[in-house]
Amino acid sequence: MTKHTTKWFTSWFDTPFYHTLYKDRDAREAQEFMDTLTQYLNLPVGGTILDLACGKGRHARYLNKLGYDVTGADLSENSIAFAKQFENHRLHFEVHDMCKPFNKQFDAVFNLFTSFGYFEHDEDNLKTIKAIKADLNESGFGVIDFMNSEYVIDHLVPEEVKTVDDIEFHLKRYVKDGYIIKDITFVADGEDYNFQERVRAFTLNDFDALFEQADAYLLDVFGDYKLRKFSAKTSERLIMIFK
């Protein structure tokens, strides 16, 4: 059976296999990034943060432990259902389409780990930045943590087999029509699965144009989770702070 949809992120992100494939993400690195980022932004004690496209809430939960009032939002109903077990009076999770304003204002809105640029329609990328800006209070900061597309393309591994929890994931990566694409095929419980990740190969110049259209102001750009200077050729990440 083949799992396929035009809006791939509504199906792939909602499967347990997505979380299996990416289970080895570095929790310590993620936590250190949150420490560094919140200190850099000098967010108020007990400040409010919206973690947009939060997945199962690993960043949101850690931010809450740091003392922030955190709302995690994601389109995946399964991920939010999982995250809700961790809720408390200062940690909440909701199913939400990030193209639309949350209709509440925050001290910061974080969009982390390349959770942007996968929409079918270009206008949804602009809508998302406009929504983030609308969800910021007067002194709030928006943060988009995106891949550095130029670096990723230069270091693309065309084919790879990755075995996780006895599932053999076959990965093919390529660039087509302005997207960085990953085809993912595997067999689980006797069934064939076929998914595809498609993310726009946005550069800093592309984001500059989006920010200008959204009437947002780009404050800072960093190239890694230690917030070091961005280099288009050598940085692995493109981390943008805006208002």
Image (cartoon, grey):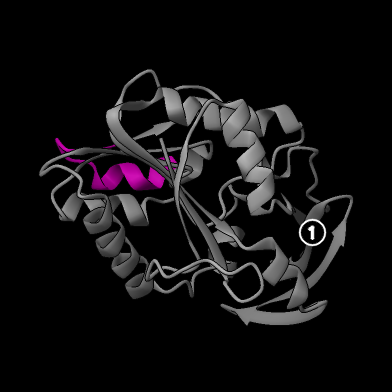
Q: Position of residue 78 (x, y in %)?
A: 49, 43
Q: Position of residue 127 (x, y in %)?
A: 60, 26
The residue range painted magenta reads 80-92
What's the residue type where badge 1 is placed?
A: Ile
Which of the 4 quarters of the picture holds residue 203?
bottom right
Q: Please state which of residues 89 and 217 is positioned toward the viewer in this rendering.
A: 217
Residue at x-position 38% and y-position 26%: 135
Which of the 4 quarters of the picture holds residue 134?
top left
Circle 1: is it few (<14), some (14-19), or many (20+) Cα within 10 Å? some
Q: Position of residue 112 (x, y in %)?
A: 47, 52
Observer able to see residue 188: no
Viewport quadrant of the C terminus: top left
Element under disc 1: strand
Q: Is residue 37 left or right of residue 91?
A: right
Q: Please state which of residues 129 and 183 is positioned toward the viewer in this rendering.
A: 129
Label 1 belongs to which residue?
181
Residue at x-position 18% and y-position 45%: 68
